[in-house]
Structure formats: C-alpha cells, structure tokens
Amino acid sequence: MKYLFILLLFVSGTAMAQKDSLPYIKVLGIAQDGGYPHAGCAKACCEQAWKDAGKRRFVTSLALVDPASNKWWLFEATPDITEQLHYFRQLTGGRYRYLPDGIFITHAHIGHYAGLMQLGREVMNTKDMPVYVLPRMKTYLENNGPWSQLVSLNNIRLTALQVAGKDMKSGFMGQTLADGILVSAFQVPHRDEFSETAGFHISLRSRQYLFIPDIDKWEKWDNSIIDMVAAVDVALLDATFFADGELPGRSISEVPHPFVSETMRLFSTHTARPGLGSRIHFIHFNHTNPLLRDPKTRKEVTKQGFHLAEQGEDL
Ligand SMILES: [Zn+2]
Ligand SMILES: [Zn+2]
Ligand SMILES: [Zn+2]
C-alpha cells in the first residue's frame, strides 16, 4: 500500500514536471493598435479606463514561452513594448532573459511594429535581435528611417519568412525555433499600404495555434477560416469591432475587419463542424468595442462557447 502511494506520487510528479516543461503562449496585450484607453478619446468607452489604471489594456501581443530551452519569442513589437517586456518578466518571475530570443511581426501598422524603436541606440541598443517578417515588410524596414538605422547599426537582424502556399493544403514551411516549436507565416488581405500582412501558425509539440490579429473580411480571403480553425486547438482572431456602426461619423469601410458578430454567426451557422467556436479566442479589441468593458456583451459571446483573450493568461 505504502509503495503504491509512493509510486502514484512519483507518476503524478513526473506528469507535473512534464506539463511544466511544455511550451505555451502567454497573452501580453489584447487591444487594437491605439491601446485602451485610446489617445484623444473622452467618450464613455474609455472613461473607466482613464480613471482606473487596472482597466487599461496593452496593445495585442503574445509571448511564445519554451521552458525546456529557457527561451521565449515575442509576437508584435507594440507601442507598449516597454511595459510588456517588464510585464513578461514579472509574470514569469525573472526566469527568462529580459529580451526575447526573436520577434515576429505581422505588418507595418503602428500597433504591430512601432515598438521596434525601443531597440535602437537611443534606448536598449540591442545586438542582432532576430526579427521575422514577410518580404515586403523586410524591404520597408530596410529602406525607411528610423527603422533602416536599426538595420544598419545591427540592432536587429531581419529574416524574411517564406509564405505558405495559397491553399495551405501542402502544409506550412516554417521557422523551427527549438525542439518541436515551429512558426509559419501566411498572408491575409488587409490595408497593405507599407507592407503585406501576415498571420501566424504556431506549432508547439502537440498543440497548434493560429494568430490573425488584423484581416479585412473573411470573405476577401481565398482560404476558409472554418478550415483553418478546424486544424488548430486555439485560434486568436481579429475582434477589432463588435458590430457595424461602432465608429460614429466614420465609415467602417475605410477600416474593414470581420465584426465579432459576423465571426460568431459564421461559426454558429456552420453546422457541419459544430463546436469549432470554442477554439476561438477573440483579440485586438478597438477602444469602442463593448467587449472591453460591458459584461452583458461579453456574456453574449462566451455563452455561445467563444472565448475572449485576457491579458496575462496562458493558452
Ligand atoms: Zn492592428
Ligand atoms: Zn474610447
Ligand atoms: Zn493593421
């Protein structure tokens, strides 16, 4: 009896140690490019967040953490990068290097890459920080200041990611970061003024993740978001706006995104594959999105099995 107890302790101890060494994703921010509260907003949407610092949220960013190799990688260099690097250190108790082992960036809209400026001579003066981007984004950073100075002074070392084939049926060609950790990029339709826009497929041993913080509309894409979500365990998807009419006095067609209400409808009416919605974690909330503050709207979404990404959570 005593031996059985010791054996059980040993087995559960080993399982726990294994679980502790598995790679995972940590959410470092959930807001749209402008953060929450938003510059210049004196409306009801940001009122509580101005008053109460606890209600503020950083711009969308993820950490890929690998306890086995003691390494971590940052997804998006946001305008909140100063806070987010410190936040990551606090959440992980200083176990990892202060700076990530590499940075993946989706596109050249300010919320996704402007934080690179903190890597330059004026601040951290990093040496050869690996930065992974799509080819047009690489050319953009190399040829436009102040980013070009990060390249010429070797603060960052750019790698152009190969884009997965159009139908993605042939699988992903990715960047192997550590044992069992593979990140692949694919292109999504978005307002591509300075760069194309990437989405990422993150493969962590037996768990697969999808990260699409910005896309115009699902129907503009020649891939099926239903098939993409069906192929992963966790899909972090664009939730910029909850529904039409959210930007008074401004046409939403200038800044198209799939409304959360549309994505919910798409997945709840797709009866051929029920339950896929529970893999979706909405992220990249605009300050106007009631999901940032209104419990009733939040419940409407979670009641149907969808998740809302939370700053600081592990996935
Ligand atoms: Zn964005
Ligand atoms: Zn606001
Ligand atoms: Zn964008």
Image (cartoon, helix red, strand yellow):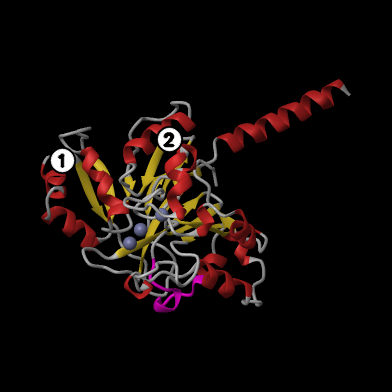
Vertical order, 48 against 238 (above or below): above
Q: Amino acid at mark 2?
A: Phe
The reply to whether discs 1 and 2 touch (Cβ–Cβ < 8 Å) is no
Q: Disc 1 or 2, which lies upstream in sequence?
A: 2
Which is nearer the eye, 35 or 128?
Answer: 35
Q: Position of residue 156 (x, y in %)?
A: 21, 43
12 relative position to 43: left or right:
right
Residue denoted by label 1: 154
Instruction: Quadrant for the N terminus, please.
Output: top right
> 10 Å neighbourhood of mark 2: few (<14), some, or many (≥20)?
many
The residue depicted at 39 percent of the width and 68 percent of the height is 248
Q: Position of residue 111 (x, y in %)?
A: 32, 52
Q: Secondary structure at mark 2?
A: helix
Inspect the magenta stretch and tell me whether residue 222 lies in it. Answer: yes
Q: Of all residues shown, which one is farthest toward the top?
A: 2
Residue 236 visible at all: no
Q: Amino acid at mark 1?
A: Asn
User: Magenta region: which residues?
Assistant: 215-225
Disc marking residue 224: none
Q: Position of residue 19 (x, y in %)?
A: 60, 38
53 relative position to 4: left or right:
left
Q: Position of residue 202 (x, y in %)?
A: 45, 54
Q: Secondary structure at mark 1?
A: loop
Vertical order, 269 against 109 (above or below): below
Disc marking residue 88: 2
Image quadrant, ligand 3? bottom left
